[in-house]
Amino acid sequence: MLHRRDFLVSMSAAATAAQTSGQSAIPRTESYPAPDRELMVPVSGGRVYVRVNGSIDGPRLPLLLIHGGPGGTHASLINSLALSDERAVILYDQLDTGKSDHPNNPANWTVSRFRDEVEAIRIAVGARR
């Protein structure tokens, strides 16, 4: 079982090692398992790409990870799939990033719209909370 602290330390160490070696800190996604489920979720302003690994209705709460803002993608969080054997891991690309729609409308870039985006994803994948 991978503990949260061990996971965070390994992510930090990998990013540091990649920076000092001149390599990208983002892992290659083709070496990770395929999503158990992929969907495009309608949100205000477009649709967002969502991937789920693991069981949404398992005994532990699902983990929904957000890549941290415009310009990032779910690929930077792909190492978190190591946790999908104990809980569902939900990764997504915010609107205007990655595999999501790219309307490029600054009116979409608000905290309340991003919050609503997370709620739409929770409902679409069937997570209770």
Image (cartoon, rainbow, N blue to C red):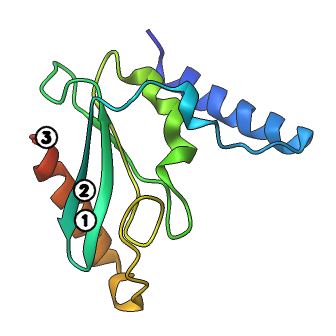
Q: Secondary structure at mark 3?
A: loop
Q: Amino acid at mark 3?
A: Ala
Position in image of residue 30 (x %, y %): 55, 32
First reached walking from the N terminus: tag 3 or tag 2: 2
Horizontal placement of 50 versus 70: left or right?
left
Q: Is residue 101 visible?
A: yes
Which label number is shown at residue 40?
2
Name the residue nearer the viewer: 85 or 5.
Answer: 85
Residue at the spot 57% in from the left edge and 46% down from the top edge: 76
Looking at the picture, does residue 10 appear above or below residue 29? above
Horizontal placement of 29 versus 104: left or right?
right
Residue at the spot 34% in from the left edge and 91% down from the top edge: 107
First reached walking from the N terminus: tag 1 or tag 2: 2
User: Mark 1 to mark 3: distance in Å?
Assistant: 14 Å
Q: Which residue is mark 3?
A: 127
Q: In the picture, residue 26 is in which quadrant?
A: top right
Q: Secondary structure at mark 1?
A: helix
Whether the residues at callouts 1 and 2 have beta carbons within 8 Å, the answer is no
Which label number is shown at residue 117?
1
Q: Amino acid at mark 1?
A: Glu
Position in image of residue 95 (x %, y %): 37, 69
Q: Amino acid at mark 2?
A: Met
Which label number is shown at residue 22?
none
